[in-house]
Amino acid sequence: MKRVSVILVFFAFLAVSSSVLYGQSQGIPEVWGGKDISMVMSAENVTLEFDCAQGVVMTPIKADASGNFSVAGTYTPQRGGPVMKDNPPQDLPATFKGTIHGNVMHLEVLLQDKSQQPPAFTLTKGQAGRVMKCR
């Protein structure tokens, strides 16, 4: 009976470790989150959701040896209520700049119009963001 239990535990461990390694090799997106922000980073791009905005970066974020990064993308402010056909949200050019140290990312969204620039964010890898969308 003990031998059967040991064998079952071994195969269960093997199945779990294989699925984890398989998932990593398949490029499963990384989830990062924090207060007022949620980010999904894939091998191709980055999508961001803010309380009253969204963002897109068409390349993955890759930090240098010091943990610093700076990538170009778009930031789209949103507002509550219906979206008007004749006044849709406008994509604004943005620079997403920050640092990654371990599982913590500090992120700034830099816009030409400083009045629309959001505050800096702190994100944690593997955590869902806490976002309250404008309604």
Image (cartoon, rainbow, N blue to C red):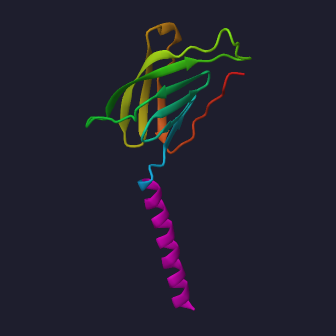
Magenta segment's dominant SS is helix
Relative image position of residue 40 (x, y in whole percent)? 51, 38
Name the one closer to the observer, 27 or 81: 27
Q: Confirm whether the magenta stretch covers residue 67.
A: no
Residue shown at 47% from the left, 33% from the top:
46
Image quarter in which the C terminus is found: top right
Image quarter in which the N terminus is found: bottom right
Q: Is residue 17 above or below residue 103?
A: below
Relative image position of residue 11 (x, y in whole percent)? 50, 77
Residue shown at 40% from the left, 32% from the top:
59
Relative image position of residue 73 (x, y in whole percent)? 44, 23
Q: Is residue 4 above or below residue 131?
A: below
The image quadrant that residue 49 belongs to is: top right
Relative image position of residue 122 (x, y in whole percent)? 47, 31
Q: Is residue 113 above or below residue 97?
A: above
Which residue of the protein is positioned furthest toward the bottom in this rendering? 1
Residue shown at 70% from the left, 17% from the top:
80
Q: Which residues are magenta?
A: 1-24
The image quadrant that residue 8 belongs to is: bottom right
Which residue of the protein is positioned furthest toward the left in this rendering? 65
Q: Is residue 2 above or below residue 13?
A: below
Q: Confirm whether the magenta stretch covers residue 13.
A: yes
Which residue of the protein is positioned furthest toward the front in this rendering? 85
Q: From the viewer's perspective, tell me whether residue 121 is left or right of residue 72.
A: right
Label total for image: 0
Residue shown at 42% from the left, 34% from the top:
105
Name the one closer to the observer, 39 or 127: 39
Q: From the viewer's perspective, tell me whether residue 82 is left or right of residue 34.
A: right
